[in-house]
Image (cartoon, grey):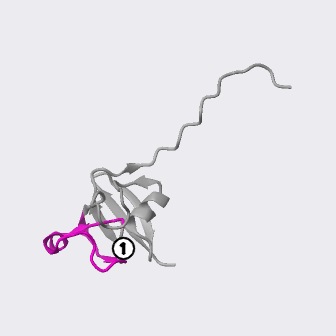
Amino acid sequence: MASHPVLIQPSGLRFDAPAGTSVLMAAQVAGIKLPSSCRNGTCRACMCLMLEGSVAYGIEWPGLSRDEKEEGWILPCVAQATGALEIQAPGAAPIEPAAAPVRPLTGARR
C-alpha cells in the first residue's frame, strides 16, 4: 500500500500517512497527537494550515469555507494525503505512554 510522508511544523515531527487513511489517524498510529474532537469534519478543532502538498476528502464538503480552503486550511480528521504533505499544527506533540499504575506494597505473596 502506498504511503505519503507528512512533516508537521513547527515541531518537525514526521510520519507516513497510508493512502486511504486520514492524516489524523495516521498521526495517531505513528504516536503523534494532533488537536481533535469530532473526527468527522464538523467541529474544526483539528484545523491546520497546509504549507505544501495536497489532500483529498472522504466527505463531499468538510467544515471549511471556500476562502479557508483556498488559503490552504485543511481538516486532518477527514483529509487524506495524496502526496508528500507539510502542515502547520502548533498543537502537535508526541503521545506520551500511559504511566503504569502505582500499586502499594501489600506484603508477601504466597
- Please tell me which residue lies in front, 55 or 58: 58
Total residue callouts: 1
Percent of width and height locating residue 50: 25, 67
Task: Look at the image and say whether residue 70 sits in the magenta stretch.
Answer: yes
Left or right of residue 24: residue 53: left
Task: Give the residue furthest to the right.
Answer: 110
Q: Residue at x 49, y 60 (%)?
A: 29
Percent of width and height locating residue 68: 16, 69
Q: Residue at x 76, y 19 (%)?
A: 107
Task: Look at the image and say whether residue 50 sits in the magenta stretch.
Answer: yes
Percent of width and height locating residue 98: 53, 41
Q: Residue at x 29, y 65 (%)?
A: 42
Report the quarter where the C terminus lies: top right
Q: Residue at x 28, y 72 (%)?
A: 62
Secondary structure beneath disc 1? strand
Tag 1 residue: 81
Badge 1 amino acid: Ala
- Please tell me which residue lies in front, 83 or 102: 102
Q: Quadrant of residue 51?
A: bottom left
Q: Quadrant of residue 75?
A: bottom left
Residue 97 to residue 54: above or below:
above
Question: How packed is label 1: few (under 14 Cα within 10 Å), some, or many (20 or more)?
Answer: many
Q: Quadrant of residue 46?
A: bottom left
Left or right of residue 67: residue 10: right
What residue span does the magenta drawing correspond to? 49-77
Residue 91 to residue 21: above or below:
above
